[in-house]
Amino acid sequence: MPDYSVSFRRSAEKDMRKLASSIQDRVIEAVEKLAKVPRPSGCKKLAGSEDAYRIRVGDYRVIYTVDDVILIVAIERVRHRREVYR
């Protein structure tokens, strides 16, 4: 199975810049794993969306979409669990 390419939307890049570097490292590690397995165990499909998922990285949530046709995982948001769904 070919690897997916991972891209960060501008909103996710902004979110990443606001995080502490230790958390950034953990998020990047988790996101890199999505290239191999875009829907790992523990990921949740978001209600009301065709292809949006979320994974947990400690108290933070990574919201992303998966396009199986062109093999892209697009990171939409990286926020604290208290703010991410607003």
Image: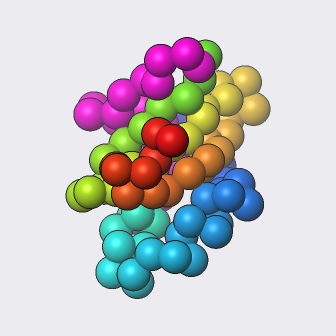
Left or right: 10 with respect to 40? Answer: right
Q: Residue at x 55, y 16 (%)?
A: 48
Location of residue 40 in the rendering, given as x and y in whole percent from the top left corner = 35, 35
Where residue 33 sits in the image (x, y, percent)? 41, 52
- In which image quadrant can residue 30 be found? bottom left
* Foreground of the two, 55 or 6: 55
Does any portion of residue 14 appear in the rendered image? Answer: yes
Q: Position of residue 12 (x, y in %)?
A: 61, 59
Above or below, 10 relative to 48:
below
Q: Residue at x 52, y 76 (%)?
A: 18
Q: Which residue lies at the image location 26% right of the left edge and 34% below the top edge?
A: 42
Classify residue 25 by image quadrant: bottom left
Q: Is residue 69 depicted above or below 23 in this figure?
A: above
Label the magenta part by its dominant secondary structure: loop
Horizontal side of 81 relative to 71 (left or right) equals left
Is residue 33 within the magenta segment?
yes
* Residue 63 falls within the magenta-colored stretch: no
Bounds of the magenta span? Answer: 32-49
